[in-house]
């Protein structure tokens, strides 16, 4: 057997397993997004994935692992990472516009975020870390804007960052409930226009 043939044989089962894990993660995203973590079951995920519960648990040993897989899949699709430059506001608006085409991912996030405020929820540490990271990142972005004279006088960069995060999460929920009446990207742009000065 040649080394190439050996490599192909090793990659075959691995690729199949990775595809199965992806399929299950997508099913978990759909189930937890629609029913929440407490309302969705492993059997629900198995049904949505079109496989047995035993097969699901082979790849993800418990319900908590399924939840983490769903959240990671959601992050991979919806989380942008704007750089520290003058395109920050545009990248936020573009990410919000993209998210409007991924309603099931926003549903998952909103449902689990609300549930995670209880002390025993398995996603609590995920959301705590996420909010801490984003407050820091957005605060740093606004600090940069301030350093180049683009932040409106009197605006605290870190308060602006926390406010942007709060607005984004809140307007997403309103958009989920009334998508025809709420302009998620437009609302975020309006806020950013209030705190960021136009380029001279």
Image (cartoon, rainbow, N blue to C red):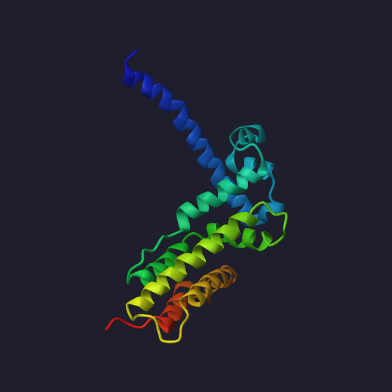
Residue 32 drawn at (x, y percent): 63, 52
Residue 7 drawn at (x, y percent): 37, 23
Instruction: Report if residue 178 is visible in the image.
Output: no
Task: Tell me if residue 200 comes above or below residue 38 in the rendering.
Answer: below
Q: Name the residue at 53% across, 57% down.
A: 105
Q: Residue furthest left?
A: 200
Judge by depth and name the residue closer to the eye, 148 or 34.
Answer: 148
Judge by depth and name the residue closer to the eye, 49 or 95.
Answer: 95
Residue 122 drawn at (x, y percent): 67, 51
Task: Tell me if residue 145 comes above or below residue 48 in the rendering.
Answer: below
Drawn side of residue 172 relative to residue 121, left or right = left
Q: Name the residue at 32% across, 15% down.
A: 2
Judge by depth and name the residue closer to the eye, 156 or 52.
Answer: 156
Q: Name the residue at 52% across, 36% down.
A: 20
Q: Name the residue at 37% across, 24% down.
A: 8
Residue 155 drawn at (x, y percent): 46, 83
């Amino acid at each position: 057997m040649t080394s190439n043939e050996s490599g192909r044989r090793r990659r075959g089962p691995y690729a199949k397993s990775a595809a199965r894990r992806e399929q299950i993660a997508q099913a978990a995203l759909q189930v937890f997004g629609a029913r929440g973590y407490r309302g969705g079951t492993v059997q629900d995920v198995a049904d949505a994935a079109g496989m047995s519960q035993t097969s699901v648990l082979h790849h993800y040993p418990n319900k908590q692992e399924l939840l983490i897989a769903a959240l990671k899949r959601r992050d991979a699709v919806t989380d942008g990472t704007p750089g520290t430059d003058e395109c920050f506001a545009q990248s936020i608006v573009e990410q919000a516009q993209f998210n409007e085409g991924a309603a099931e991912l926003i549903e998952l996030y909103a449902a689990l975020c609300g549930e995670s405020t209880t002390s025993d929820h398995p996603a609590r540490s995920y959301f705590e870390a996420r909010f801490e990271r984003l407050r820091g990142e957005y605060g740093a972005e606004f600090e940069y804007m301030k350093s180049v004279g683009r932040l409106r006088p009197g605006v605290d960069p870190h308060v602006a960052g926390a406010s942007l995060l709060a607005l984004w999460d809140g307007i997403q929920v309103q958009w989920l409930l009334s998508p025809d009446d709420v302009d998620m990207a437009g609302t975020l742009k309006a806020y950013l226009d209030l705190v960021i000065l136009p380029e001279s």
